[in-house]
Amino acid sequence: MTSIMYHHVNSDRCSNELKVFEEHLKYISQNYTSLFPGEEVTSKSICLTFDDAYADFYYFIFPLLLKYDLKALLAVPTKYILDDTSYTQDVRLDFEHNDLFKNYEKATFCTFKELREMVDSGLVQIGSHSHSHVNLLEEGVDLEEELVVSKNILEEKLGIKVESFVFPFGKYNEGIAKEAHKHYQYLFRIGNAIHKDFSGIKGVIYRVNGDNLTQVDEPFSFKNRMKYRFKAFIKRF
Ligand SMILES: [Zn+2]
């Protein structure tokens, strides 16, 4: 099972050009079956994950998931999510990647109203990406707040159960993973490895980088598959 990590389309960083990204999703829909965490895995399983829930996910990526009937996990940092907004699409999308967090009051992230609509489609599952999107290894971080407050907000506002947590910046240690596992069944990080199932490597699921694709089938090339297998093998020790 390959889990892939994406962020944006048509942005200046951590992104893919929309046209390339659509071809990539089309390729996946023709060759793989997309799963939510915990669903039954086969050799053709894939778990698509999107970090941060930037507004472009709602405007550009969600319509493609509908078009190609693909499931995806969306990792949401709850502090930056507004209930609803009257800002237009143009205003919301007119920011560089590095300015999105500080402008969250202009609805640079998906709103709860949009998250609800996407959840209702059956193709988007919501995971927590902490509350404030901080590096959990930093001193002074309130781990309980980052892990639990975010989950409670999502579950209450969306009427769902949240079972996945995506570490902000992929940062954690063994103690943090253990604490996170008390609240979430599935933990995700960055890391270019592949898996037999959703149990992960030492309890954490590694995700292949899907941003800045140079070819539509890049994560599936023979060379990359070998690399991801090798990484999964050595990381077990
Ligand atoms: Zn993030």
Image: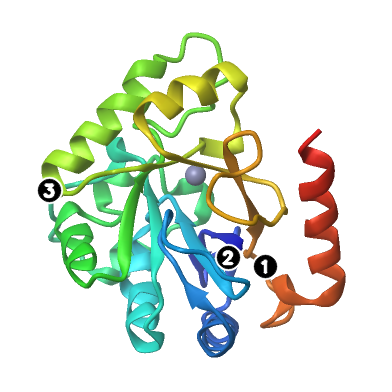
Residue 132 location, x and y as percent? 38, 31
Mark 2 residue's CB less than 8 Å from ligand 1: no
Q: Are marks 2 and 1 in contact (CB under 8 Å)?
A: yes
Q: Is residue 29 left or right of residue 54?
A: right
What amino acid does circle 1 point to?
Asn
**In front: 106, or 121?**
121
Q: CA distance from mark 2 to mark 3?
A: 30 Å
Q: Is label 2 in a helix, a strand or a loop?
A: strand
For the point 32% across and 20% down, the residue is 145
In this rendering, does residue 94 appear at all? Answer: no
Question: Residue 15 — which label?
Answer: 2
Q: Is label 3 in a helix, a strand or a loop?
A: loop
Question: Residue 212 — which label?
Answer: 1
Q: Nearer the viewer, mark 2 or mark 3?
A: 3
What amino acid does circle 2 point to?
Ser
What amino acid does circle 3 point to?
Gly
For the point 59% across and 86% down, the residue is 31
Q: Is residue 164 left or right of residue 87?
A: right
**In front: 94, or 151?**
151
Residue 77 location, x and y as percent? 36, 41
Q: Are marks 2 and 3 in contact (CB under 8 Å)?
A: no
Circle 3 is placed at which residue position? Answer: 159
